[in-house]
Image (cartoon, grey):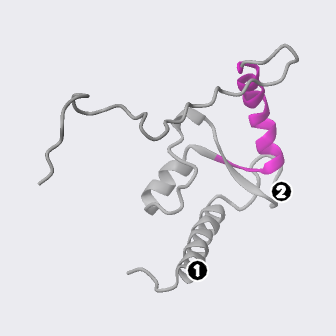
């Protein structure tokens, strides 16, 4: 049943998710598996293609444990050391202009009033009852 005050509900949900994350961190030793640091811990997917979602702590515990089995617990510095080569390779594959800057995707044309395609015949009259 939803709360009458959305701010109270949001605060409860944040605390609930934080508690689930704390339990997951505790189950993994609450320290970086590489340097043993206890600061700014993150879950690193060994194979990013197997990742289901970033937001897993609202799911059932079985789903959380299944997702965390694909992960290593790393501090943010060690995590960046692992992901930097992947990010660099991805960036090198993106198109650049003559100055070496990334080229943004072209904007999607907006459809204004009256320019939407018709679902019926153009000359067909609609009968109003």
Residue 99: percent from the left, percent from the top? Answer: 88, 17
Q: Quadrant of the N terminus?
A: bottom left
Q: Which image quadrant for residue 60?
A: bottom left
Mark 1, other Cα within 10 Å: few <14 / some 14–19 / many ≥20: few
Mark 2, mark 1: which one is toward the viewer?
Answer: 1
Looking at the rendering, in which quadrant would you find the C terminus?
bottom left
Q: Is residue 114 above or below residue 101?
A: below
Is residue 116 a member of the stretch shown in magenta?
A: no
In the image, 15 versus 32, the foreground residue is 15
- Relative placement, left or right, of 54 versus 85 is left
Q: Which residue is mark 1?
A: 7
Residue 1 is left or right of residue 48, and the answer is left
- Judged from the image, the secondary structure of the residue bearing numbered disc 2 is loop
Instruction: Measure how far apart labels 2 and 1 are at the Cα level.
Output: 34 Å
How would you classify the magenta stretch by its main secondary structure? helix
Q: Residue at x 82, y 60 (%)?
A: 39
Residue under pointer 2: 37
Q: Residue at x 76, y 43 (%)?
A: 79
The span picked out in magenta is 72-94
């Amino acid at each position: 049943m939803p709360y009458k005050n959305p701010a109270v509900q949001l605060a409860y949900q944040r605390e609930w998710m934080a508690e689930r994350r704390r339990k997951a961190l505790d189950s993994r030793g609450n320290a970086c598996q590489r340097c043993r640091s206890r600061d700014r811990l993150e879950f690193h997917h060994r194979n990013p293609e197997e990742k289901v979602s970033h937001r897993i702590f609202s799911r059932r515990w079985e789903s959380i444990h299944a997702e965390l089995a694909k992960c290593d617990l790393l501090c943010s510095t060690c995590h960046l050391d692992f992901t930097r080569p992947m990010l660099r390779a991805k960036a090198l594959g993106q198109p650049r202009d003559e100055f070496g800057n990334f080229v943004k995707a072209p904007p999607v044309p907006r459809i204004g009033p009256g320019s939407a395609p018709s679902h019926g015949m153009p000359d067909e009259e609609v009968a109003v009852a």
